[in-house]
Image (cartoon, rainbow, N blue to C red):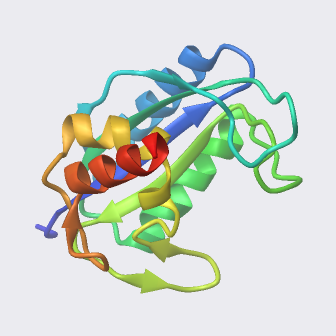
Amino acid sequence: MKSTVTTYIGVGSNLGNKEANIRRALAMLIETPGIEIRRISAFLTNPAQGGPEGAPDFLNCAAEVVTSLSPKELMKRLLEIEQQIGRIRREKWEPRVIDLDLLLHGNTILSTDALSIPHPLMHERLFVLKPLAEIAPNALHPTLGVNVKTLLQKLETAHRD
């Protein structure tokens, strides 16, 4: 039997029926061999960041997944699910029907043109850290050496100042 690793995935949508899009993506993940979803955070509404002015709000959540897939295999599957749900990639941070981000894959540290783990912006984004802290407050960011709960507290403090 292949060994497994605990992985965290950020899920978001800001086009169409956002909740249905997220639920469909999660269902497709569940149906994938080598993937077991352990926990899903509450769904949170968040303003779009970095995209065009007036972009619709996002609905976001985080999922804890136990997988035997390598980071590359898992990312390939996430991109397939995005495409099957109807995501078309034209420009960075544009509105999208579904967005699946590989946030953490165990203690993996990886940086290639196609994939960076941990997700390079996760520690700067409340819409990633809030749902992630709900399901995995003690998950460790392997390059920063700090857990998710602490990252969230630091970011919330910075946003108040």
Whether residue 126 is visible: yes
Position of 4 relative to 156 (above/below): below
- Which residue is farthest front? 161
The structure residue drawn at horizontal position 35% and vertical position 35%, both measured from the top left corner, is 131
The structure residue drawn at horizontal position 29% and vertical position 78%, both measured from the top left corner, is 108
Q: Which x, y percent locates residue 2?
A: 16, 69
Position of 107 relative to 12 (above/below): below
Q: Is residue 35 left or right of residue 121?
A: left
Position of 90 relative to 53 (above/below): below
Quarter holding the N terminus is: bottom left
Q: Which x, y percent locates residue 81?
A: 58, 43
The structure residue drawn at horizontal position 63% and vertical position 30%, both measured from the top left corner, is 13
* Number of residue marks: 0
Residue sitting nearer the eye, 100 or 154: 154
The structure residue drawn at horizontal position 21% and vertical position 37%, both measured from the top left corner, is 135
Position of 59 relative to 87 (above/below): above
Whether residue 37 is visible: no
Q: Which x, y percent locates residue 98?
A: 64, 36
